[in-house]
Image (tube, rainbow, N blue to C red):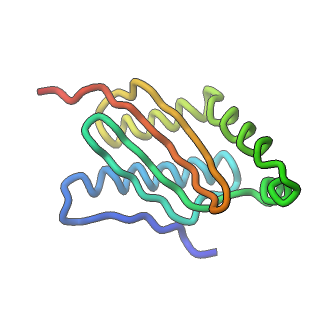
Amino acid sequence: MPEPTVEETTQDPQGSVRASISNAMVALKKQYYGRGPERAKTYINDDYVFCAMEGGLTRNEETLLEAGEDKLVRQYRLRFQETPAVSEATIGAVEEATGRRVLSYHSQIVFKPTRAFEIFLLESAPR
């Protein structure tokens, strides 16, 4: 399986921060699920961070989806993301990359095509 791709624009001063967040999200998914997404791209706008990831379902999740169990896979993924070990590591990665505190974090996954989203609200930047 090829290495996941992370998109980064070197002309953009936030490019390395976005790439760092994308790399961290891929690594965390791989660590906690045993398989990570094939692609990740992070967007930062003011106090918001949005990371979109493609693919990365486990074999048992794919089997459940084939059986029409979309709701079960989504519920499991979202509940797992809420566990302290996973949520703290996820929030910590964004705080480290941005140098700002995360005020709120939300995770979502959709299927057909499979996309996972990590959404963060950051504390306002110092002025």
Name of the residue lying farthest toward the right: 67
Measuring 30% from the left and 26% from the top, which residue is drawn there? Answer: 123
Measuring 44% from the left and 40% from the top, which residue is drawn there? Answer: 93
Q: What is the tally of numbered marks visible in this picture? A: 0
From what the image shows, is residue 24 above or below residue 78? below
Please provide percent x and percent y for residue 32: 66, 45
| Residue 9 image-quadrant placement | bottom left
From what the image shows, is residue 29 above or below residue 4? above
**Where, quadrant-wise, is the N terminus in this rendering?**
bottom right
Q: Is residue 48 left or right of residue 104?
A: left
Q: Is residue 39 left or right of residue 82?
A: left
Please provide percent x and percent y for residue 42: 39, 53
| Residue 94 image-quadrant placement | top left
Q: Is residue 12 left or right of residue 82?
A: left
Please provide percent x and percent y for residue 113: 63, 62
Measuring 34% from the left and 52% from the top, which residue is drawn there? Answer: 18
Name of the residue lying farthest toward the left: 127
Q: Is residue 13 left or right of residue 7?
A: left
Name of the residue lying farthest toward the bottom: 2
Measuring 53% from the left and 56% from the top, which residue is drawn there? Answer: 53
**Where, quadrant-wise, is the C terminus in this rendering?**
top left
Please provide percent x and percent y for residue 78: 66, 36
